[in-house]
Image (cartoon, grey):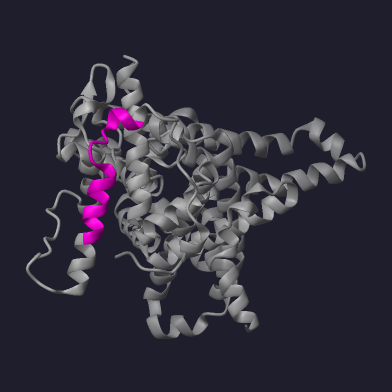
Amino acid sequence: MSFISKIEKFLRRDLWLPDLGALHGWASFYIRTLRLVVVAISDFRDGALSIRATSLVATTLLSLVPFLAVTFSVLKAFGVHQQIEPILAQALEPLGENGAQITSRIIEFVNNLKVGALGAVGVAGLFYTTFALIDKIEEALNHIWRVRHSRPLARKFTDYLSVVLVGPVLVFTAFATTASAQSHWLVQSILKIEPLGAAVIWMTTLMPFVLICVGFSFLYKFVPHTQVKISAACVGGVTAGILWQVAGMIFASFVSGSVRYSAVYSSFAILIIFLIWLYVGWLIVLIGAQVAYYHQHPSAYLTRLRWKQNTAAFREHLALTMLVHMTRRYLSHEPPYMEQELAAKLGVPLSALEDIVEDFIDEGLVYRTVEPKGLMLGRPPDQVSVLEILQLVYHKGYPPVEHDPQTNDPVGRLLRQRDQAVCDALNGMTLQMLAAEEPAALSIPEPSSLILDQPVS
């Protein structure tokens, strides 16, 4: 076996062996990091992140000036509006001289926009455009976190208003406070004392990176419509911050060597470079969110591969395990499970359950209840056969293919024998009987069936 073949075998199979997950210390850190990198690259190759980033670029072009206008108006009321230009210039710094031109042009647009002269309809349109940008960001992050439902409209209004009104004030106040603290006499005195002076200078140099990481972490923690752990948000924020710095250096080098593009595109070159940087920036935001998701759901490494393969064995086991837990709740007269609670109990991400739940709801096997809120069995468990559940998961509500018993087709005969053997083995077995046995647990997929690049059927 060649060296390349060994690497492919390791990345496709050996990396996902269950015993590797039992490692501790640095070995566990390396394995988890490598799994994360492999899955992230695979997700990127699927094209979903690229499409989302492109969509966010288009929304940003329409919403950038209105968003900055609303932010500028709010900041002006608190007296910190002078900070908007240097921070925008810092964000566009990788564009070189073009970044300074774009910054001055955007600030010029914002200054020329007279909010008071727009009237009620104009101001409403301004806020709606800003609302649409944040809503698009939430939609993209919800997709990464496998959340089907976004915030209710009332929650969107209050939460987005808080982001627009309070968030910029806190961010720009922090920048202003940091800048003013550097010129304080106490800080200047400390700078003269070594090695404290060198440490303060080092911290000052590191502060922009720290603030970028904090901003990304805040985004990942509060924008998705789901519970995101602080540790996961911080891991995603630091990852995005590092990628932002690295991409900034690479892009700055690219821009400095792209004089020939100006000769080809003339005055459009600055627009094209700006669009590329916007795309790279949103791609970094989405990659950081993906890292946060996989950090919070380590089992999603294997779950994602199984769902990418669309294996029936995993769906059947997950469906039966889910219904067994719901049956035990039903028989003990306890409140029904919430979907998030049930997913956490089974150790799988919410998205792994939602597709199966929707199929069961369509067939009347499961209902969503309002009071108490949760998932409830549609029929008593002693009236639900295990065979019915398996057929529903396998065929997804469509009638199974009938194999004509009159034909001598060897394949049809074999499939009839298999179906008959399953019916005989599960005859009379109900959901209640299954729930009465030992507690169910979701088993880890066999590593031999994990092939990273196998397409979905």
Q: Is residue 427 magenta?
A: yes
Q: Quadrant of residue 278?
A: bottom left
Q: Position of residue 266 (x, y in %)?
A: 39, 80
The residue depicted at 29 percent of the width and 27 percent of the height is 432
Front position in the image: 203 or 193: 203
Q: Quadrant of the C terminus?
A: bottom left
Q: Is residue 154 magenta?
A: no
The residue depicted at 47 percent of the width and 36 percent of the height is 168
Which residues make up the magenta segment?
Answer: 417-434
Image position of 361 with respect to 29: above or below: above
Residue positioned most to the top: 333
Front position in the image: 377 or 29: 377
Q: Quadrant of residue 233?
A: top right
Q: Predominant secondary structure in magenta?
A: helix
Judge from the rendering whether residue 196 lies leftward or rightward of residue 335; answer left or right.
Answer: right
Residue positioned most to the right: 194
Q: Quadrant of residue 321?
A: top left
The residue depicted at 33 percent of the width and 64 percent of the height is 456
The residue depicted at 56 percent of the width and 56 percent of the height is 36
Q: Position of residue 230 (x, y in %)?
A: 56, 34
Q: Position of residue 251 (x, y in %)?
A: 55, 69
Image position of 83 with respect to 6: above or below: above
* Count of numbered circles in the view: 0
Front position in the image: 351 or 57: 351
User: Is residue 285 shown to the viewer in this render?
Assistant: no
User: Is residue 422 shown to the viewer in this render?
Assistant: yes
Judge from the rendering whether residue 332 lies leftward or rightward of residue 26; answer left or right.
Answer: left
Front position in the image: 278 or 438: 438
Image position of 215 with respect to 416: above or below: above
Judge from the rendering whether residue 338 lies leftward or rightward of residue 448; answer left or right.
Answer: left
Q: Position of residue 61 (x, y in %)?
A: 33, 57
Q: Quadrant of the N terminus?
A: bottom right
